[in-house]
Amino acid sequence: METVILAVVIALVAVVAAGGLVVGSRRKKQLPPAPPSTPTITAPPAEPRVGDEAEVPRDEPRRTIEEVVLPETPGAPVAVEELPVPAAPVLEQPEPSAGRLVRLRSRLSRSQNTLGKGLLALLSREHLDEDTWEEIEDILITADVGVAPTQELVDRLRTRVKVLGTRTPGDLRALLREELLTLVDPSLDRELKTESHETTPAVVLVVGVNGTGKTTTTGKLARVLVADGRSVVLGAADTFRAAAADQLQTWGERVGARTVRGPEGGDPASIAFDAVKEGIAEGADTVLIDTAGRLHTKTGLMDELGKVKRVIEKHGPVDEVLLVLDATTGQNGLVQARVFAEVVDITGIVLTKLDGTAKGGIVIAVQRELGVPVKLIGLGEGPDDLAPFEPEAFVDALIGD
């Protein structure tokens, strides 16, 4: 009996064990397989290979011994790279001063024909009564000839027209030309004194009020002198206007003339003195001094102008004092001229903007007022539009062809 029971127990144990194996195998089959993990494999460093396993050598540029840069040794000379030398600025070639007024005659005649043609038209009338002569006087006074010169001209014209009798256009033109030329006075010395002395250069002082084109005239005058073969030094003594020195230096650089300048607001007399000193050192022919544009009503500034002239004279004489006047201001320019003449000895007049006004008679009036000649006239904005004054060419432009 015990044997039978033992056999039954063994059989049950075998059945249970077999069932667990089956369930376990089923569970294992139902679970999804786990993703295989990717192991990180670190490649061992490459080892140099020799012999048959060696790589094919790469082509590399080879340097010669001259190309190898050796380390610098103390005391060895250092090679300095030479920089390219900048090319010298190209200097302008100004037009010759001789005959400039003839070349610029058309500009002058366009604005002056009112005077010349108006007079010829009146003189050509069949009957020259008092009203006609008054009209002639009005034209002359309007052109700023001045009262006294106008009366002189009218009186001579009246006399000569009566003597002439017949008045053909050619005769009248010749008569008017002769009388106007007498008023302009071709006998005055209009030569600019710009030749150097034995040990010092000629000194030209340029004066005038603000707005007359004084600094520009100084620069253009430098071109006139360079065109005539002079060596020039410029003195920028206008220290009260910020751009004056820069403007003058630009004019000088165009023709190779050196500009002596100082600090803004500096002493004008000191700069003028240094400019003449530099001119002596360089052996220049002419020194041009541009002064500050002074108002003729400011006594202190006018006195300073006298100081500039006295300081320059410590080196030597001032050869020219040129007063720049704006031709468009007419009779107001005469007031300016009187005051300047009281401070410095004016030797010549420069009339600017003469191409833009019909008041060409100012040439006659200012010469009568100061007793000094008009030496230069400005006829445009171009760099070579400053011309030596020639009485014959001027009168021909006034009355036209």
Image (spheres, helix red, strand yellow):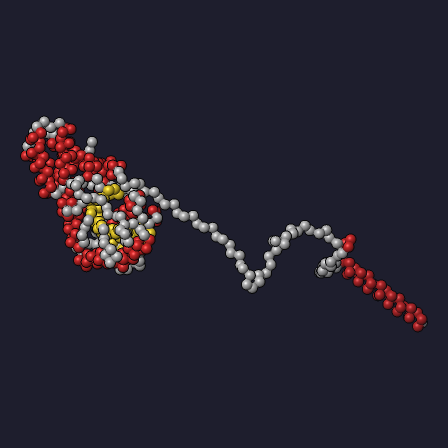
Image location (x, y in percent) of residue 114: 17, 36
At which x and y percent is residue 148?
9, 43
Count of labels shown?
0
Q: Which quadrant of the figure contains the N terminus?
A: bottom right
Please give the name of the residue rendered at 25% of the width and 51% of the height, measured from the top-left corner. 204
Residue 71 relative to residue 35: left or right:
left
Query: Which one is in front, 261 or 33?
Result: 261
Rendered view: 338 above or below 112? below
* Up/down of 198 relative to 109, above or below: below
Q: Quadrant of residue 315?
A: bottom left
Residue at the image point whose x is 30% and y is 40% from the top: 96
Most foreground residue, 29 or 163: 163
Q: Nearest the camera: 156 or 317?
A: 317
Q: Left or right? Give the position of 37 relative to 391.
A: right
Identify the residue shown where x is 91% and y is 70%: 6
Q: Is residue 315 left or right of residue 14?
A: left
Instruction: Tell me, yes or no, if residue 306 can be seen here.
Output: yes
Name the residue furthest front: 198
Q: Report the front residue among 91 and 124.
A: 91
Q: Residue at x 20, y 41 (%)?
A: 357
| Residue 228, horizontal then vertical, whole percent | 29, 43
Give the residue at the far bottom of this rendering: 2
